[in-house]
Image: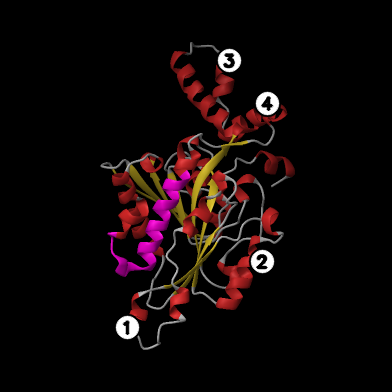
Amino acid sequence: MDKKEKTYSIRTDLAVEAREMVSEENIEIPGVELKEEVNDDYNLSVTKVRIFNEEGAKAIHKPIGNYITIECEAIKANDPEVHEEVVKQLVKQLQDIIKMRKKMSVLVVGLGNWDITPDALGPKVTNNILVTRHLFETIDDSAEEEDTYTKVSAIAPGVMGQTGMETFEIIQGIVSKFKPDLVIAIDALASRRTSRVNSTIQISDTGVHPGSGIGNRRKGLTEETLGVPVIAIGVPTVVDAATIVNDTMEELMIELKKHAKNGMDMMDMISGFNNVEKYQLIKEVLYPYVGNMFVTPKEIDCVIKRVSNIISAGLNILLQPDLGEDEIQKYLS
């Protein structure tokens, strides 16, 4: 990829969007498998993208692995019934890619800046995680209670501007000292579709690169770098300004096509633009006025609280199954 292509690449952390940029249709891409499930009762969909070889990884620019996307518009609304269903779906999908066992040690990492609301998802989730590692230090080895809980610890390491340290350096130090069996990292993401902002949860077993969605590429938290499996959970909370205009332009073109008359050469030219070409044009036009701006909805404070509660509830039920589903209501209240 040359310098110009990097500058104009459409920013997204979602594998489902990376696949869409290759082909908007459900056309098979070598090395990539796509499965979709829809729950019409809650207007909820689950899309599973599996990249199983290097050809697929190169095609959509994502590492080999599994990517599960839960989409539901009501995630960002104040709808406890829908939130409960999303929690159940989150637990189900996590159970499919994590093989839990007794006395398992899990480190939950909340990535992001707790002082910036769109980036505070990770810290807010860790704040609601039921940590139990310290209890194992006081429980007798022969006690039966020890078998009923997962050994869970949690940390929100902040960002380099707050700590002066790379997130990777902090997590690597913790992992090397306490040797967890699994790391679960939660982070705010970037999307190329305004409709997916705050209404989508992505799960992947390929780890995470903090800050990659807004162009701040940091050393990744992956099984290769940390030496233990890393599960990533993310929610897109921002889009860049050009993406918003790109979505508007797409809708405008659709409407113009409906009313276009034969022989409109300008219309034919505009209609021939693909997504990347439209994005490049918009980026060039907008940059002098809005610069490298990212946009988030005005109700972001309430939405981040709701989404963080959904994820923390799902993780608590996954990691401490003996708590039962009654715990859902506690963490959604």
Q: In which quarter of the image is residue 160?
A: bottom right
Q: Position of residue 154 (x, y in %)?
A: 51, 65
Residue type at numbered disc 4: Val
Residue tagged by mark 2? 169
Q: How far apart are marks 3 and 4 (CA)?
A: 22 Å
Q: Is residue 91 left or right of residue 151?
A: left
Q: How far apart are marks 2 and 1 (CA)?
A: 36 Å
Judge depth for marks 2 and 3 and give the one in front: 2
Identify the element where label 1 is drawn. Answer: helix
Q: Tell me if mark 1 has few (under 14), some (14-19) or many (20+) residues whose alpha carbon lies within 10 angstroms of its own.
A: few
Identify the element where label 2 is drawn. Answer: helix
Q: Where are the magenta residues, as a range?
A: 304-326
- The dominant secondary structure in magenta is helix
Whether residue 59 is visible, yes or no, is yes
Viewer-proximal residue among 286 and 134: 134
Residue tagged by mark 1? 144
Q: Is residue 141 left or right of residue 261?
A: left
Tag 1–tag 4 contact (CB < 8 Å) = no
Residue tagged by mark 4? 285
